[in-house]
Image (cartoon, grey):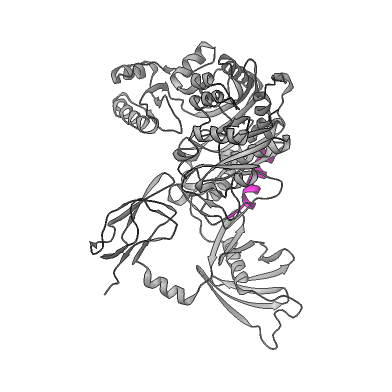
Amino acid sequence: MFRKILIANRGEIACRVIDTCRRMGVATVAVHSDADAGARHVAMADEAVRIGGPAPADSYLRGEAIIAAAQATGAEAIHPGYGFLSENPDFVEAVEAAGLVFIGPSAAAIRAMGLKDAAKRLMAEAGVPVVPGYHGDNQDPEHLAGAADAIGYPVLIKAVAGGGGKGMRRVDRPADFAAALASAQAEARGAFGNAAVLVEKYVEKPRHIEVQVFGDGTRAVHLFERDCSLQRRHQKVIEEAPAPGMTAEMREAMGAAAVRAAEAIGYSGAGTVEFIVDGSRGLRPDGFWFMEMNTRLQVEHPVTEAVTGVDLVEWQLRVAAGERLWVRQEDLAITGHAFEARLYAEDVAAGFLPATGRLAHLAFPEGVRADTGVRTGDTISPWYDPMIAKVIVHGPTRAVALARLARALDQTQVAGTVTNLAFLAALARHEGFGRGEVDTGLIARDLEALTAEREPDDLDRAMAAAAVLQAAGLPEGPLAGFSLWTPSRVRVELDGVSGLLWMTGPDAAQVVVDGIELAACRDAQGWAIAGRRPQVVEAGGVIHVFAGGRTASFRRVDPLARAGAVAEAGNVTRAPMPGLVREVTVTAGQRVAAGDRLAVMEAMKMEHVLTAARDGVVAEVLTAPGAQVEAGAALIRLEEEA
């Protein structure tokens, strides 16, 4: 076994690998960018090496710097995690040329599965079912249109390189094919530097079911399937194992096909064979087709670990260290059911825009596995994926596991940035999902209901009352609340709520919010209000209240600051989040109208246009293109209105 390895990644996967290494007695080296100097994975590792600036191209994609760090620290092997360099065959060859071990498949295996068209031809030769389609090299538009006619509409145009839904278009009619092809090719060229596409039959009610495989370069086994059908815009949201409705006959057929795929390329380590499944007729052995193979550990690997009892990272280390596969297929079995929900910093109401911010508070319920790369006080950076954590639960049955997921999401507490937590909780309680009626279109069909704004209810009022009680700083002790003749009433002003309260006993109070009176009582666990028990955390002058999967934040009001804020409103344009100023389109003295473009920021790989809140004259430009700014930074100031 290795004495020391380097982890060429960051965030939750780096922390996940470190956890297993600690248990196995293997020392770890973390690498980090400037943005990650204080990150959780850096603190957890035995050693850490800086490898460059915050942009991935300046750090986590610098293979030569990572290899140099491994050599300088005496690491014997490199674990790539997922993303970044994990499926880069040139990096694998460079690692091996440096005398180090790459903890993953060979460069040849990665190349064999790197392009979807070539991979599908290889799989067909290995006896793995593939979706009817054209996977050839001829990219002439007329030839591709003819192939679509032969396949039969609807068809799917897909980029042969990359993934994530980029370069993918559904086409329902021959008349729409040319425009869809041009659009898909342009997107593929921009995203992957490769405009080549393939054309496949579109499956009307598709399910995304993948099989976890593991090989030693000669022999492979499968660790059963995961259902990843709950997706939004081709991005996975909640995954589960095993797949609902799976039959023993189909599991055997899919597992055998996945093992054939792995053994056909001499696969070593953990990998995933992804299949598209026709869910319109139920799960049948003749209704699944190969999509692609991910030649790395998957984000959703914890659900497989939960139902098999296997530590896949341990297996990766053992095989990379030279062990032959020590189990046979008949040694593996499924126990119970597991779910994983991906918790992101994103603004669901704004169309799931990635968000940033400092985590004022982060806590997960006991008994729940939460794979995370951040802690309270950390910042969700604009440079990387905004994942906060993966929340993983296990239960003896699907129904029990799903109930545990819903409860875990209700009890997860995040403050300091907007998240998709309420959206995940709504999915966990979706009736169709609860019945196992899953396909890749479920979220899109019910998106409005899943993201609907709610009217304030009793729980919201109880949360507001909890904030009022916290802000009031009520006394404790046997004489708390004592008043000689009439209760002493206290008015509390918060940003977003005004409350009136009075104590009716040492540990009892009445609170009025929204004109409704609520009874509250205090014990060792805090305040209970109208039968609810919100949890309250105060950080940086902001009171954060958590209950029922919801978060409400209230800022203490300073009357002088409020007056200043009113005076500033409309005069100063501020950065809505940390990011890079790409463009400033105005100069001092320039007259602007409400809605005019003032500047462009880039954050989370997306552009955000900042516009004037009113008509006026630019007094000052406080930033410049190329500036990295924090959330709330003043960028443009208008002259005071006459």
Between 245 and 603, the residue placed more toward the observer is: 603
> In this rendering, would 86 be left or right of 202?
right
Residue that appears at 46% across and 25% down:
203
Q: Residue furthest front?
A: 72
Percent position of residue 439, x then y: 52, 33
Between 502 and 46, the residue placed more toward the observer is: 46
Q: Residue furthest bottom?
A: 485
* 300 in relation to 362, above or below: above
> In this rendering, would 577 be left or right of 227?
left
Say which quadrant the N terminus sits in.
Answer: top right
Q: How many numbered marks, from 0 up?
A: 0
Percent position of residue 468, x then y: 59, 70
Residue that appears at 42% across and 24% down:
160
Between 284 and 42, the residue placed more toward the observer is: 42
Say which quadrant the C terminus sits in.
Answer: bottom left
Whether residue 408 is in magenta: the answer is yes
Between 352 and 485, the residue placed more toward the observer is: 352
Using the rendered image of the protein, determine whether residue 350 is visible from the camera's viewpoint: yes
Majority secondary structure of magenta residues:
helix
> In this rendering, would 157 be left or right of 82?
left
Residue that appears at 67% across and 70% down:
520
Percent position of residue 624, x then y: 33, 55
Using the rendered image of the protein, determine whether residue 430 is visible from the camera's viewpoint: no
Residue that appears at 42% across and 18% down:
133
* 422 in relation to 297, above or below: below
Percent position of residue 473, x then y: 64, 74
Whether residue 323 is in magenta: the answer is no
Q: Which residues are magenta?
A: 396-414
* 609 in relation to 4, above or below: below
